């Protein structure tokens, strides 16, 4: 029984560290729409992140959008064709969820951390 609990705790910590790295690599702060977004094409990873955030008391929603299959490089004007995949967005909105995300998880990358701090300042400057 104790071994199972330790295994489950270790598994939770490993999953949490994956979500932390996901937010650093593929997350951003959308100050215009007052939200934090995590992006990935793997729905299992996005659902895992959503469930771990839920366990921490942070509400979020998953949205899906199709990526264009043809993109062009604005500098070289080359056209690239890629597989048509669905991109999943995990969106954290609402003041209490963003404040909790900032306090418990946050971002390691400076520009993302500063954007999150700016968003929190915007929330604090508005009347409730």
Image (tube, helix red, strand yellow):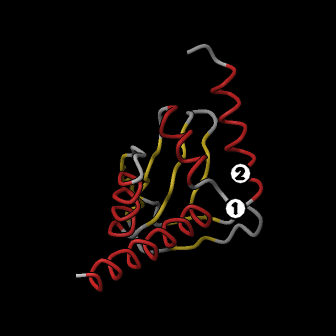
Left or right for 24, reference 9: right
For residue 13, the mark is none
- In percent of the image, x 61 and y 52: which residue is there? 28
Lower sequence index among marks 1 and 2 = 1
- In percent of the image, x 42 and y 67: which residue is there? 41
- In percent of the image, x 77 and y 57: which residue is there? 110
Q: Which residue is mark 2?
A: 113
- Asked if the residue at tag 2 contacts the one at tag 1, i.e. Cβ–Cβ closer than 8 Å, the answer is yes
x, y percentage for residue 102? 60, 46
Q: Quadrant of the C terminus?
A: top right
x, y percentage for residue 64? 36, 53
Dot 1 falls on a residue whose secondary structure is: loop
Q: Is residue 83 above or below residue 96?
A: below
- Residue situated in front as seen by the camera: 121 or 33: 121
How far is the residue under mark 1 from the one under mark 2?
7 Å
x, y percentage for residue 95? 52, 31
Q: Is residue 103 above or below residue 99?
A: below
Q: Which residue is mark 1?
A: 108
């Amino acid at each position: 029984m104790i071994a199972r609990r330790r295994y489950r705790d270790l598994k939770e910590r490993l999953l949490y560290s994956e979500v932390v790295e996901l937010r650093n690599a593929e997350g951003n702060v959308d100050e215009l729409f007052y939200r934090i977004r995590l992006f990935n094409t793997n729905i299992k990873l996005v659902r895992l992140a959503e469930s771990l955030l839920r366990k921490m008391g942070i509400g979020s929603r998953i949205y899906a959008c199709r990526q264009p299959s043809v993109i062009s490089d604005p500098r070289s004007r080359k056209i690239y064709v890629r597989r048509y995949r669905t991109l999943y967005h995990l969106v954290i909105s609402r003041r209490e969820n963003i404040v909790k995300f900032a306090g418990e998880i946050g971002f390691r990358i400076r520009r993302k951390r500063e954007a999150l701090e700016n968003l929190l300042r915007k929330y604090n400057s508005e009347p409730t």
